[in-house]
Amino acid sequence: MYALRRIVAYIIDMGLILTPITVLVGPLQGRLAAALPSFWQVYAGFFGWVLSMGVPVVVIGVLVGLTGRTPGKLLMFLRVQGRRGSKPGVPAGLLREVVKAICASMIFGALYALYGVITSRRSAAERSHRRAEELAQADARSPVAGGARGALLSHST
């Protein structure tokens, strides 16, 4: 039950902090990308990612460090304490949030990859095996000596 309360508190915090930042960063990122040359547009996306991930980590980390609570923890009657029962301090609060952000990114990344495997109904190994079979069949059908890949290689040199 305690773990569920912590998860709900984190979801509340992300909803209260991440949603407004995302709503504000989206149009800003679009304007920035439109104003930059095509080569620099990658950095506009990176800038948006840093804002949408970095700002919540800093805000929540500072809140936890200074008060021991966030809005979600307050609603779920939770608090963070240091070793002696005091408030943890800003460096400890920031470290907690950085670790949580990295772990959440890994979990959601793994879920996204799992979703891709489930929806394609094939694993990555099966897809690569099927691609190898398609290349082998193309080589067998090709009238050029060396197969289709050999023809491509001879034209490219």
Image (tube, rainbow, N blue to C red):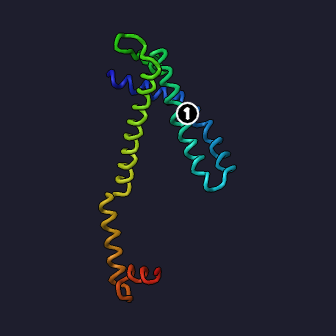
Identify the element where label 1 is drawn: helix
What residue is shown at x 55% (from left), y 45% (from top)?
46
Q: Position of residue 133 (x, y in %)?
A: 31, 73
Q: Is residue 149 above or below residue 41?
A: below
What residue is shown at x 39% (from left), y 79% (from top)?
149
Callout 1: 10 Å neighbours few (<14), some, many (20+)?
Answer: some
The quadrant holding residue 2 is: top left
Q: Position of residue 117 (x, y in %)?
A: 35, 54
Image quarter in which the N terminus is found: top left
Q: Residue furthest front?
A: 157
What residue is shown at x 48% (from left), y 14% (from top)?
67
Q: Position of residue 97 (x, y in %)?
A: 44, 28
What residue is shown at x 57% (from left), y 42% (from top)?
47
Give the residue type at disc 1.
Answer: Thr
Q: Residue furthest right?
A: 35
Total numbered circles: 1
Task: In this rendered view, identify the residue nearer to me: 153 or 114.
Answer: 153
Query: According to the image, label 1 marks what residue?
Result: 19
Q: Position of residue 73 (x, y in %)?
A: 44, 19
Can residue 102 be seen from the camera position used here? yes
Left or right side of 6 for 15 = right
Q: Residue furthest top?
A: 85
Left or right side of 124 for 40 = right
Can residue 75 be seen from the camera position used here? no
Q: Is residue 153 above or below residue 123?
A: below
